Amino acid sequence: MVQVTTDIPVVPPAQRGYWSGVLSRLRRDPVAMICAVILAALVLSAVFAPWLGLADPYQGSMIARLSAPGTPGHLLGTDEQGRDMLSRLIYGGRLTLFIGLMPVVLAFFIGGTLGIIAGYVGGITNTIIMRVVDVFFAFPSVLLAIAISGALGAGVLNSLVSLTIVFIPPVTRVAEAVTSGVRSLDYIDAARASGANALTVIRVHVIGNVLSPIFVYATSLTSVCMILAAGLSFLGIGVRPPEPEWGLMLNTLRSAIYVNPWLAALPGVMIFATSLCLNLLSDGLRSAMNVRD
Amino acid sequence: MTPLLQIDHLNVRFKGARNVHAINDLSLTLMPGETLALLGESGSGKSVTLKTLLRLLPEKRTDLTGDITFDGTDIMTLSGRSLRAYRGGDVSMVFQDPGLALDPVYTVGQQIAETVMRHKGISRADAMEVALDMLHRVRIPSAERRLRNYPHELSGGMRQRVMIALALACRPRLLLADEPTTALDATVQIQILLLMRELQREFGMGVIFVTHDIGVAVEISERIAVMYAGQIVEEGSTHDIIRDPRHPYTRGLLAANLHDVERGARLDAIPGAPPSLETRPDSCPFAPRCAFALPACRTALPPVATPGPRRRVACLRADEPLEIAHA
Amino acid sequence: MSATDQPLLSVRDLKKHFPIKGGILGRTQAMVQAVDGVSFDVRAGETLGIVGESGCGKSTTAKLLIGLVDRDEGDIELGGKSLGRDISLRALRRDIQMVFQDSYASLNPRMTILDSIAFGARVQGLDDPVGRARRLMARVGLDPDRFAGRYPHELSGGQRQRINIARALVMSPKVVVLDEAVSALDKSVEAQVLNLLSDLRAEFGLTYIFISHDLNVVRYISDRILVMYLGEVVELAPVDMIWAEQAHPYTRSLFSAMPSMDPDNRTQKPPLTGDPPNPIDPPPGCRFHTRCAFAADVCKARHPVLGPMVQGSPHWVACHLHDPASGHPRAGQGVPA
């Protein structure tokens, strides 16, 4: 029996909000969920590293240098100064994740704001913002990061600044593109026609509709950012020794590649796994945020 | 005379998160050289029917049953080379938006010639001659120059003429048209309709013309099949459908055209909306919106009445004179 | 109809030219004369239908009326108050509202329909926005208890257009501009929405500006019809008069292009050939002369002025054929049959 009354409700009534819908869709995506769990484990272990009962990541031992993974007392072996690898990898996650995520978070806010303004206001404002952004686009991101870091000098804070500058242009460009797309839709015109000023229209109608594509794009940048940050440390213009950081560890262990290749590969595996998980999670997020399904 | 196209008990169901029973037990016969309008609203299954005829539906997500015979050939079993020869050779299609259906990186002449070469196996120079001839036939002014134009250099009406030239270049015996004039302005729409009518006479092909606009159907077709919820609810000559509509849905559509409604008078609008077709209709799908529905309409599919030759009405009350009661 | 002599809305010599920019420096290459000197009056309670083909400027006119596009020239007066001089755009927007063609694109997909309706009332600081929105939902035929928390994609096209109408009415406007508001709907749903629009007009004493390409719909709902061609008004008349006699050759073509609805007497010859020309650099003189069967030398040289067919007639036309002093060979004889 076909149920048809006047103006049939085709879809069951939904009272829940948008984000809870995204979450419930994301929960049904096994790949994204596995990645989320791995990332959560990495972040939690990094945050709570001092309370995990690990060996001192700075304490070396001349006699226990470059011991292989599985050595008693050193589950993942030791590095070229005899420091415990497991401990250094987990402590290293603190810095690596911080300078991998922070620049993207900052770029998300700064670039997102610039892009939304450029996209909504248009005209001369748009031209000025986007031409400046284009200048930064002229340089490959790796070169730009190296150049700025080189000029500012090594150190965590300087890496943070240079990477943030590197990621503002792409975020701005994406934000501008989605905003000018939304700007041309009739509901924006309808909102303007009700007498709302630009700030109200942006706050109520634009941000909610452009945030998710910008957010998804930004999550995909975090993996690039981590690799760039590791690269800066590898080149010696990022984090300075003896701080544990995955890129720096990759650099210092590179001479051990003939002695104990597994050991030398470990920091690289961490970078690879983290960025892969971030990419897959952002893919899952992209499809979960699609409302019209 | 053998029919050009025969569809028997066609069923199309889309599988997915939600099942949609898009076509439900559809049967249709088209004689050679006949022009039939498939008239229906969005979701009635008229475009799905066209896609099924060209076997364009995604096979993995579609359940297809029933028989389609084109000039004695079983369409449902075609594959590979014979399917490609059928598509674009024996049967071709004109789409609603020529801007999307034409390839932007080739000139108009190249696109027509390419199709002709593929299907007829003639040289490029001969194919270009055919292309030029086709542009003349669709009455494109200064055709020699237009041959070298890209689609974006043409106006909407010109593009639709090119689309028709492309569809007819291989002399198909059946032309499928999916709302080809809906996106056009009124003065251009009537030009294209008259052109298609002329070309149909000239080429003698069968035409199935999908539209939601009764006026367009009247201008183009000699027969009309009215679709609702994936079924044909009424079929007959255009004259009979317009002058003597029997199905309450057809009557409603005619009234909604506002052609001869008194200004400002209350419209006899069909209430409600079409069914979602998540389940297969097992009673008259129009009954919930019908002003004349009887209890029997809600319990079983209506019988198909045949008030005349090649005329049918899927309604229990097809033979009663029904008058809409004014409240 | 409570039409009085004092127009509620008065538009004088409205102009909007859009620049087309190109080249490396983004210099203006050409101007699209989207709306070029449009004038008309609308009385309170009246419905003015605007018809024309794509590019004729009917949608731009709608957006100019509500300030979504800035006018280059011209005056808009509402109730005797001039926009920009006597009333602000924000105040005008309380009194003029708009319903768009695309029912989905005109609703924020991330907002519940109740919030979408209430938004305007909140912005204008009206009391009890939610109560207003719920009452209007009920009035347009959607039970607020069932539908208030839903999102646009959960509704059918007809339901969404009802919501858009409710949204336009939330500030109790005087004028509603309906820009192809029923064109995207299925015919059976279109009739329901037209009935609703008629009811609302009577109940709230609304004045409509109804833009459509469907002459049958415009005839049904309008009191007067305004015909536009390439950014200009070519004819303006009460519905019955224009239905009886289309004074402008373009209007006549437009009417002849309607499908005949008579299977025994189908259209045999298209009234016009070719597509409507581009409003970029329109032809001089009468803009229709390039496609007009009755064009004479004067039509290429001189621009016809919109005016009454005969002194005092409400039937206005801009065509040299109707002006005895125009110098057209058939001047004063009207459009030949």
Image: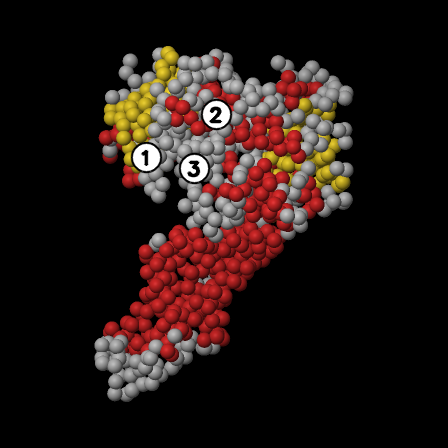
CA separation, marks 2 and 3? 22 Å
Give a yes or no on whether discs 3 and 1 share a subunit.
Answer: yes
Residue tagged by mark 3?
B100
- Tag 2 and tag 3, C-beta contact below 8 Å: no
Mark 2: which secondary structure? loop
Label 2 crowding class (10 Å Cα cut-off): few <14, some 14-19, many 20+? many
Residue A174 in picture, x, y percent from top left: 48, 55
Disc sitting over residue B13 in the figure: 1
- What's the chain of the residue with tag 2? B
Q: Classify the position of the N terminus of chain B by image quarter.
A: top left
Q: Of marks 3 and 1, which one's residue comes earlier in the chain?
A: 1
Residue A22 in picture, x, y percent from top left: 42, 53
The residue type indicated by label 1 comes to Arg
CA separation, marks 3 and 1? 27 Å
Is residue B237 rendered to the left or right of residue B25? right
Looking at the rendered image, the disc whose residue lies closer to the viewer, 2 or 3, is: 2
Q: Of marks 2 and 3, which one's residue comes earlier in the chain?
A: 3
Residue B58 in picture, x, y percent from top left: 31, 38
Residue C273 in picture, x, y percent from top left: 53, 23
Residue tagged by mark 2?
B213
Residue lying farthest to the front in this orientation:
B295
Is residue A108 rendered to the left or right of residue B134? right
Is residue B24 rendered to the left or right of residue B264? left
Q: Of marks 2 and 1, which one's residue comes earlier in the chain?
A: 1
